[in-house]
Image: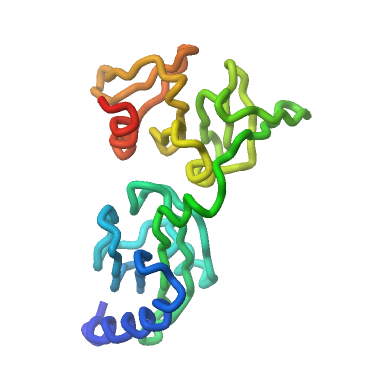
Amino acid sequence: MNNKLNSCTKDISQQYIMMLKDWIPTDASIAIAVENTYIYFHSSHQNIRLEVGQPVLPGSIAGQVLQTRQKTEAILDNSLFDTPYYGIGYPINVQNQPAALVVVLPPAFSAKKTEPFQFLTGKQEEEWNPIAINKISHIESLQKKTWFYVDGEQFKTTITLKELQTRLPSYFIRIHRSYIVNIHFIKKMARDLTSNFIVTLIDGSELPVSQSYITNLRNALEF
């Protein structure tokens, strides 16, 4: 990125902050990305993992805005925060360069937007079945579809894991990019031959725990 662009970044960023501060929460975060690199970031959130100069991740809100040049909003996983977050991205220009302005609302905002699910409606063949949330042992993302399991039976839902993570009761824990588990159905946790954690459920199902989510599980079960 050239020196001219670097020299004007602060002034441009401050202009956007002045426009935004009247309507966004004081603990929201603001990021600006140009040429697939974050050139500005401001946040009062202590658990965020984002720095100036960091490349834009594919699939992130900033990445989608830079690619499509359209306003983008989504609930995303914990690639930046320790918990899911809600963000809105806007296409802007910085020194005639395509850029993305991203406003990230605090995790608490996302949690307060909607009440936790009391049930999920799952599909089996040509039937739709409403299932009480507390009967679901775990939820899986597989081949771009979401499945949940009850007494060994598999049901399909149209709701993504990212969305579910913000709407499930606190006893559901994300343990992997592809799995959310109901802790009431966990029988044991142990390391496998490669020292990775495996969660074994009461029905014998074994689910992997990825390194990025092991803290979630430890905090929930205090081990």
By what rule are the colours in the image chosen?
A: rainbow
Q: Residue at x 28, y 36 (%)?
A: 215
Tell me the quarter of the picture where residue 25 sits. Answer: bottom left
Taking the view exactly as shown, the residue that stands out farthest to the right is 126
In the figure, 106 relative to 171: above or below?
Answer: below
Q: Nearer the viewer, residue 18 or 13?
A: 18
Residue 99 screen position, x and y as percent: 41, 75
**Number of dots carrying numbers:** 0
Q: Nearer the viewer, residue 25 or 160?
A: 25
Tell me the quarter of the picture where residue 171 sits. Answer: top left
Instruction: Please state, as top left, top right, bottom left or bottom right, where the N terminus lies in the image.
Output: bottom left
In the figure, 187 relative to 133: above or below?
Answer: above
Q: Residue at x 40, y 86 (%)?
A: 96
In the figure, 42 relative to 131: above or below?
Answer: below
Residue 32 screen position, x and y as percent: 35, 72
Tell me the quarter of the picture where residue 28 sits. Answer: bottom left
Q: Residue at x 32, y 19 (%)?
A: 189
Residue 19 screen position, x and y as percent: 42, 82
In this picture, residue 116 sits left or right of residue 185: right
Q: Residue at x 53, y 43 (%)?
A: 167
In the figure, 207 relative to 10: above or below?
Answer: above
Residue 55 screen position, x and y as percent: 30, 62
Instruction: Please state, as top left, top right, bottom left or bottom right, where the C terminus lies in the image.
Output: top left
